[in-house]
Image (spheres, helix red, strand yellow):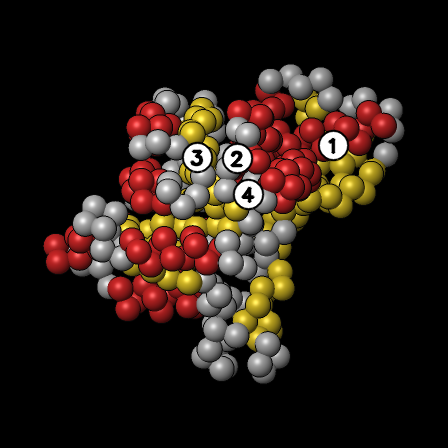
Amino acid sequence: MKIILDQDALFDNNKAASFNRDIFAKSKTVVINVMSSPGAGKTTLLEKTVSALSNEFRIGVIEGDLATERDAERIRAVGAKAIQIETNGICHLDARMVSKALPEFDLDEIDLLFIENVGNLVCPSKFDLGQEHQVVILSIPEGNDKIVKYPVMFRVAELVILNKIDLLPYLDFDIEQAKKDLQGVNPKSEFIQVSSKSDEGMESWFDWIRSLFER
Amino acid sequence: MHEVALMGDILDLIKNDAEKRNIKRVSKVELVVGELSNALPDALEMAFDIFKSRNIEMLQKDAELIIIKEEAKAKCVLCGLEYHPSQHVAVCPECNFPSGELTAGETLKVKSYQGE
């Protein structure tokens, strides 16, 4: 017997994502899914962000990693509530993993929740976690060809943060080409340049976050 | 390699549906996989074989996976041209402007399965 199913392969994930979305809407928590390749500087950026904004917002962080609690510990050290999801080898977070972590937070007491996805430019792009906002970080050492090499990832970004611009004098990264590529892949995406090491440009990232609360 | 996780979800979807219909054995699964779905057909095949070798009750030993590939297509909102997107997915080759919107290629779905 042939059964026509015609169903999205991510049907179960999407159901959990909309469950999460309802919870976030109820608690009025702004949720940002942060994605990048490994080593692009997600955790450092979030450490700095928590330090800078914790007097304005009550911040929570969900850390996704293949293994170890290390990133969550770094975030706790700067004063935010952080929950680690160890995916045990799975290369992305999915909405069900996030659902299971949510009871660890009192979301009514969290204004801003970051979900730091597993470092990977392919797998996390298709898994809706129920977040309202998606940010992709690209860093100078990775080279400007990543945008055209991983278009699916860069297409889901609402904002692309170019990180580690303090390294520009030492490496051949063509910012104009990167901007052109982003425009060609995802013309709706915003683009900001920062160095979470020297703090250059970080204020524009903080302003972007603040603007989410005014929408 | 999120294809193993995806295949797990796909087989769960089929299992849930099959249970409702009292179908015990699945002999064929048909997927539609878009060029820009970020799922690789080869990796899906491999994942399917892994699940088969794990003796998942529902899957027949000789169960077959059919992948229908969906080509990426985009349409320009300005001139209406339909094109096969290149590196700059959103750039219309006629207008040379990021005015194209994807109309196909992102699909990842279970089209059908066969069983009894």
Mark seen at residue B87: none
Q: Are marks 3 and 2 in contact (CB under 8 Å)?
A: no
Q: Are marks 3 and 4 in contact (CB under 8 Å)?
A: no
Residue B108 appears left or right of B28: left
Mark seen at residue A29: 4
Say which quadrant the C terminus of chain B sits in.
Answer: top right
Report whether mark 1 lies on the same chain as mark 3: no
Percent from the top left, x then y, of residue B87? 43, 63
Give the residue type at disc 2.
Glu
Distance of mark 3 from mark 4, alpha carbons? 12 Å
The residue labelled by disc 2 is A109
Q: Are marks 4 and 1 in contact (CB under 8 Å)?
A: no
Write the residue at 35% across / 28% down. Answer: A76
Label 1: how many Cα within 10 Å (few below 14, some 14–19, many 20+): many
User: Which circle's residue, 2 or 4, is located before the other in the chain?
Assistant: 4
Q: Helix, strand, or loop for circle 2?
A: helix
Q: Chain of mark 2?
A: A
Residue A87 appears left or right of A28: left
The residue labelled by disc 3 is A61
Q: Helix, strand, or loop for circle 1?
A: helix
Q: Helix, strand, or loop for circle 4?
A: loop
The residue labelled by disc 1 is B14
Q: Are marks 1 and 3 in contact (CB under 8 Å)?
A: no
Report whether mark 3 lies on the same chain as mark 4: yes
Residue A61 or residue B4, whichever sits in front: A61
Write down the quadrant of residue A148 in the picture. Answer: bottom left
Write the residue at 85% across / 28% down. Answer: B20
